[in-house]
Image (cartoon, rainbow, N blue to C red):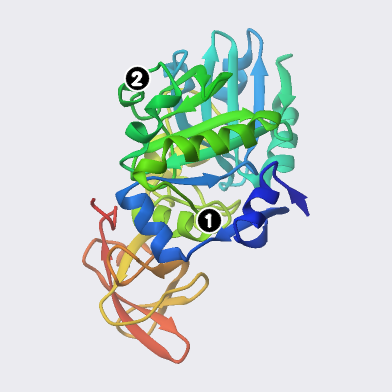
Amino acid sequence: MKNTALSHVHEALGAKMVPFAGYNMPVQYEGVNIEHETVRKGVGVFDVSHMGEFFLKGENALALIQKITTNDAAKLVPGKAQYTCMPNNTGGIVDDLIIYMIQENEYMLVVNASNIEKDWNWISQHNDLNVEMENRSEDWSLLAIQGPKAAEAMQSLTKVDLSAIKFYTFEITDFAGIPNVVVSATGYTGSGGFEVYVKNEDVEALWKKVFEAGADWDIKPIGLAARDTLRLEMGYCLYGNDITDTTSPIEAGLSWITKFSKDFVNAEALKAQKENGVSRKLVAFELTERGIPRKDYEIVDTSGEVIGEVTSGTMSPSLGKGIGLGYVTIENSKVDSDILIQIRKKQIPAKVVKLPFYKG
């Protein structure tokens, strides 16, 4: 089990630690609902240093990225980030990731912790373009400072106007007295804020300064359990649940990041899916009676026929009801369709809804 550079800090704070993607990670401190509320209304800090960082450099770096990802990275300019995914050869997804254009011919790819080795091997296998690749996942830490008060609470730590950093753009700047910090207006919560990339040796000093700066805003450390309820309220996909190596971006509702204006791995098969339609689709649903949907629960139609399965589910802290994502047959995927979730021996009624669940 690997530790992040801050695992000892979380333990000292009394966090409940769990194994996650091979790392010893804080799952909660005070409790999921309190931590969730902190991020929705104020500001909270996640240690997500388990994420992977790859650096691609060279005149063919963009060409390699275009080949392995579905979104159009040619639209990036220095200081801009892009959400995308890497398709495999069989209609599924290797991983979803964020690409940061650092400067001309230099990019940072941020990948999921559980997929670091798989992704590295996949990209290396497609690198016949002599692109210089560096896996810096073990050297970098990442704090997600999230919530509507994040910009205000953190402004004293930098000269850059944090409120001016637009969604999916970033600055490389001095932050908390540390040079060359990547401050990115990205996150996985839907409540605004920043993701801050820093070298491991600087992260403990950064953590302390972030909490000092945010004290007047009642800043709190937040665990991975609240990260999951926050992302699910927004309908953001989680790799390993809602997207996997057997789900296609078209089925998963990721057509918006799948651009056929360029060629990429398995593009023809995915284009055919988009044109001809798919037989199942990822939908969002809310329970209309009490219950908590969980991953792998069966979804049935009103005649009792199994039509799919839940991929993510929880009791929404903001809405006070059971919510989830799951794949269902295309006939049952329209908004307002009535479906049932098999929770143990009961079939609990639910309705297909439009995302996001939480509208702020």
The numbered disc on residue 113 is none
Q: Residue at x 29, y 71 (%)?
A: 320
Say few, some or many: other residues with alpha carbon within 10 Å of mark 2 (under 14 / 14 to 19 / 20 or more): few
- Kindly indicate the quadrant of the structure image that contains residue 110: top right
Q: Amino acid at mark 1?
A: Gly
Given residues 130 and 38, the one toward you in this image is 38
Drawn side of residue 146 relative to residue 238, left or right: left
Q: Position of residue 117 (x, y in %)?
A: 74, 41
User: Horizontally, is 223 left or right of 11 in the view?
Assistant: left
Q: Is residue 326 visible?
A: no
Which tag, 2 or 1, sits closer to the chain's start? 2
Is 2 on the left or on the right of 10, as rendered? right
Q: Which residue is mark 1?
A: 223
Helix, strand or loop at disc 1? Answer: loop
Label disc, if present, on residue 161 of the rendered structure = 2
Where is residue 190, by image quadrant?
top left
Q: Residues within 10 Å of mark 1 (few under 14, many from 20)?
A: many
Residue kind at label 2, given as amino acid type: Asp
